[in-house]
Amino acid sequence: MSLAKKSDNLFTIGEVLNQVRAEFNDISISKIRFLEAEGLIIPARTKSGYRKFSQTDVEKLEYILRMQRDHYLPLRVIKQHIEAMDRGLKISNSEIDKPKVPSNVLSFNENSSRRSNIRVTREEIIANTGISETFLKDAEDFGLIKVLADNRHFDEYALRIARVIAALSEYGIEPRHLKNLKSGTDREVSLIKQIVSPLARSRRTDASEQAQAMMKEIANLTNQLHSILVHHDLDSEII
């Protein structure tokens, strides 16, 4: 299971109780309040202090109750599941103790370049890519992978990069060998920003949207050029 953003509809605690009671007939308002006190559900509050639950909150509640009923999991473990799902990971019924990264996040193409809400720990990067802690540290030291501002999690790009450089390591290519490649990428990004900057700063109502589209198009073209140049030079070397 994973959690996705739902509609903006908000529910009172009584409405939530009625929604979940069909499956969990022993649920009570005091139980919901207890789960809130334990930090498993965090509803919004009105100015007057009334709880307002989102559809995601309702799904979390159903998940918590289901895990208690069907798997006898303690709240501590369920809370870890909720935290993992909030970071975009999935919980499989067959491997209930191992949060998984969705398979579509591991691969990359031009259409998957928009950021998602995926947040992974060091341990999860290592588990999903097979690299070692030392290898991950080297990738960070050479600027290939960057930890997020909280200094605890990485985004989906870090996960994808780790997966690619792990494959390259099978050919003896280490993070230190990729330093120049990263420097070239940094210069390419600076060039694209320089080109797009005037449009992004313009007063057009669609300036931001157009700037994003332009950046993506230029990036795709430079990627094509890079691939062609590499293949051309390699073909020229083949005897």
Image: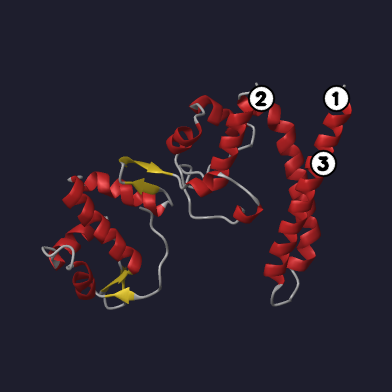
- Asked which secondary structure carries label 1, the reply is loop
Instruction: Indicate which disc, 1 or 3, sits on the residue closer to the N terminus.
Output: 3
Camera-nearest residue between 124 and 33: 124
Camera-nearest residue between 132 and 36: 132
Can residue 217 be seen from the camera position used here? yes
Provide residue 142's location: percent of width, then percent of height. 64, 32
Is 236 situated above or below 113? Answer: above
Give the residue drawn at x 86%, y 32%: 233
Instruction: Please tell me in which quadrant of the rendered image residue 29 appears.
Output: bottom left
Report crowding for label 3: few under 14, some 14 to 19, many 20 or more residues within 10 A (C-alpha): few
Residue type at mark 2: give it. Ile
Report crowding for label 2: few under 14, some 14 to 19, many 20 or more residues within 10 A (C-alpha): few
Residue type at mark 3: give it. Ile
Q: Which mark is residue 207?
A: none
- Residue beneath label 3, please? 228
Marks 1 and 3, Cα distance to the nearest angstrom? 15 Å
Q: Which mark is residue 238?
A: 1
Q: Is residue 3 left or right of residue 125?
A: left
Q: Are marks 2 and 1 in contact (CB under 8 Å)?
A: no
Marks 2 and 3, Cα distance to the nearest angstrom? 21 Å
